[in-house]
Amino acid sequence: MNTDERPLVLVWEVTQACELACEHCRAEATPQRHPDELTTSEGKALLDDARAFGDGQLVVLSGGDPLARPDLIELVEYGTEQGLKMTLTPSGTESLTDERVDALADAGLRRMALSLDGASPETHDAFRGEAGSFEATVRAARRARKRGLPLQINTTVCADTVGELPRIRELVADLGTVLWSVFFLVPVGRGAALDPLSPERAEEVMAWLADVSEDAPFGVKTTEAPHYRRVRAQRGDGSGRRGGITAGDGFAFVSHVGEVYPSGFLPEPAGNVRETSVVECYRDADLFERLRDSEELRGKCGACEFRELCGGSRSRAYAATGDPLGSDPLCPYVPEGYDGPIEGTA
């Protein structure tokens, strides 16, 4: 797929409302819905526009907690009718009932992504800020599997959660998951108060994930850690141009009020869907075009021989330096012969 023309993943943050108070929350969600959220009709217009990307465009409805919107089932059904691959990232709360899972499956949902940041109620619920979140998440995961709904598990990696990864891996397998998406913390929103991994520890975790991927009954991917592809290439099991996506290159994010960002973790707007088509923003906005051009990268990311394969986390570069084209401070790799600054811009 030509990522200059369409994203592999289009995320619409349908609301920032959520009952949870997760320690890493990018959106700094609150229980109340924003009065200026895209309306049902505006949301359907966005889905109409998304169809112009091409057949089978993947759309992720995220939040906050998407279940806070009473029109969620209607939106899933509408997107499905338009030929979009509709997926969902609900929060693990008591509102995620068997009846809700059934209704989403009946509406045509293609995949459900649930978050597990601990392998037990104690660790997960502490991170998520809500007692009962672990049990609600596991219950929904088992219901999704019963309904034949493919399940993805998302896990945030930071200093507080890294020790849980081996046990979470066992739970991911037990739940019949098709994909484990391991998110390496970007310090934005409430997540700015958490301790990220050191670059050296992150490298160790990526090597471990590569080992897991060799015999796991599920796929393994990283989020906001594209140098996992470099780690795999150095092991001899990955090659080619950009084996995944980065902010603005294969990925686009529409906020609850319609702003178009390269990523929810890179809150630099390139337009608003109330005024400009999301297709036009993605294809033609200067920020998106620059993010898709590896020659624009600066610092050691720009000098790296793996820049076409990896590209670094543009979101983390932005969070660390204010420059989305600067170096990703989580990557410890230094290109041979490079003698410039290790972090930041040139």
Image (tube, helix red, strand yellow):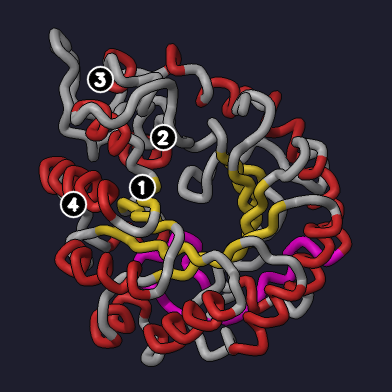
Question: Relative to 246, is 14 above or below?
Answer: below
Q: Distance between the residues labelled 2 and 3?
A: 13 Å
State the mark number for residue 314: 2
Q: Quickly name the residue at label 3.
A: 300
From where the camera sits, is residue 30 visible? no
Question: Relative to 329, is 60 above or below?
Answer: below
Mark 4 or mark 3: name the one nearer the start of the chain.
Answer: 4
From where the camera sits, is residue 31 visible? yes
- Can you say which quadrant of the picture contains the C terminus? top left
Q: Which amino acid does label 1 sit on?
A: Thr
Residue 136 horizontal/vertical position (percent) = 46, 87
Q: In this view, does 127 lie to the left or right of 203?
A: right
Evaluate if marks 2 and 3 touch, with contact meaning CB atoms under 8 Å apart.
no
Q: Which amino acid does label 2 sit on?
A: Arg
Using a 10 Å C-alpha cutoff, classify the residue at mark 2 as few (fewer than 14 neighbours), some (14 to 19) or many (20 or more).
Answer: many
Look at 67% across and 82% down and name the residue there.
102
Q: How far apart are marks 2 and 4 (CA)?
A: 17 Å
Residue 91 horizontal/vertical position (percent) = 51, 75
Evaluate if marks 1 and 4 touch, with contact meaning CB atoms under 8 Å apart.
no
Q: Quickly name the residue at label 4.
A: 197
Using a 10 Å C-alpha cutoff, classify the residue at mark 1 as few (fewer than 14 neighbours), some (14 to 19) or many (20 or more).
Answer: many
Question: For numbered disc 1, what is the local secondary structure?
Answer: strand
Look at 60% across and 28% down and name the residue there.
3
Question: For numbered disc 4, what is the local secondary structure?
Answer: loop
Region in magenta? 19-40
Q: Which amino acid does label 3 sit on?
A: Lys
Q: Is residue 6 left or right of residue 197?
A: right
- Can you say which quadrant of the picture contains the N terminus? top right
Q: Distance between the residues labelled 1 and 4?
A: 14 Å
Evaluate if marks 4 and 3 touch, with contact meaning CB atoms under 8 Å apart.
no
Q: How far apart are marks 1 and 3 (CA)?
A: 21 Å
